[in-house]
Amino acid sequence: MKPKTRLIHGGIFGDEATGAVSTPIYQVSTYKQEAVGKFKGYEYSRTGNPTRHALEELIADVEYGHAGFAFGSGMAAISSVMMLFSAGDHIILTDDVYGGTYRVVNKVLNRFGLEFTFVDTGDLEAVEAAVKENTKAIFIETPTNPLLKVTDIEAVSAYAKSKNLLTIVDNTFMTPYLQNPLKLGADIVLHSATKYIGGHSDVVAGLVVVNSEQLATDLHFVQNSVGAILGPQDSWLLMRGLKTLGIRMEEAVSNAQKIAEFLDQHEAVNAVIYPGLLNHTGHELMKKQAAGFGAMISFDVGSKEKADELLAKLRYFTLAESLGAVESLISVPAQMTHASIPVERRGELGILEGLVRISVGIEDVEDLIEDLENALN
Ligand SMILES: *Cc1c(COP(=O)(O)O)cnc(C)c1O
């Protein structure tokens, strides 16, 4: 089955009870038992719900994994995965990881005795140097946000395996349509489904897929115990989103390539970061491990003032946090998504005050380029 077909025919197709082609929204908390302990697979919706289950089967299929899990947000998914570990365990993370991930590990999970080290996971030697006796996992995000640095998933996974460590990949930016970390040797892949998977700026959700029965048992135990589950209505919206993920990504990636090339030759733009450009350090690696370069572009206009000026003039790029929607979005990471990262740390990472990030949508690319041209001139 090819990826676009898998998005539509993967998982559980339709509803067995009624023949409904779209899995119904089972808005229910509990299930009638015929006798104590005698029930049809569902007893209570925190433990399992048919609509959520259909989504979990579908995401497991499209990420080529063993089992899927749906959570109330990307952060709920990440936090639940972190609860697979115990006090005293050490985890290595990509240095310019999503701001919310940085915050939850440094301000919440550290209070429970988990230890974290941030390294440039694009540099395997740096990863190796960070491994300690109590290291249990390597958490990577690739490409990163907003600098779009690329990590070799296959190389890190192979190294992790040799040291008995788990490899966890935040695959939000690439989606299961463009990149499948489990196929490259990772153990756990997760998504903020709020972004491309939902795709329409109308749902907050997180998804996780694991590659083994043991991890499935352990993560289901955490999901049921902690309870950060996704509701049936939002589960249904994600299944609806997944059906069109393939065509949406094709369009967004194609638009992004054209926009990156346009920005790259514009004199008001200092530097354009997009993996689809030949000058991007991760270009070849992206070609090897992904089916496309994604639809996120960062570029530097020189200062906070110039960034503000650009924002004020744009018509089709909506100023908003988040990304991955049908509509193009724009943000200034230093003032928005990455404001929770201390200013010195932002400087170290290279998140400049004039750095602008765009999430390219699926509008007509000619309108998008014209809009940018008018605003930049
Ligand atoms: C948005 C995002 C998250 C967090 O997801 P929420 O759904 O907002 O909780 C995690 N990782 C990445 C890469 C993201 O873009």
Image (cartoon, rainbow, N blue to C red):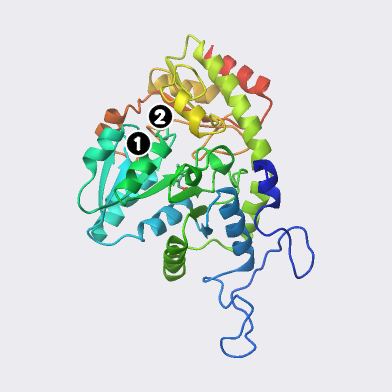
x 58%, y 25%: residue: 256
**Is residue 133 found left or right of 75 in the rendered image?**
left
Q: Toward which corner of the image does residue 345 lie, by quadrant?
A: top left
Quadrant where the N terminus sits is top right
Instruction: Determine whether 172 is above or below 304 in the image.
Output: below
As drawn, the residue found furthest toward the front would be 162
Q: Which residue carries the number 1 mark?
A: 96
Q: Amino acid at mark 1?
A: Asp
Residue identified by numbered label 2: 147
Q: CA distance from mark 1 to mark 2?
A: 8 Å
Horizontal and vertical percent position of residue 337: 41, 38
- Asked if disc 1 and disc 2 are in contact, CB closer than 8 Å, the reply is yes
Q: Where is residue 351 drawn, in percent x and y?
A: 35, 28
> In the displayed structure, would residue 15 be above or below residue 344?
below
Residue type at mark 2 is: Leu
Assign a secondary structure to mark 1: loop
Disc 2 crowd rating (10 Å Cα; few below 14, some 14-19, many 20+) is many
Tag 2 secondary structure: loop
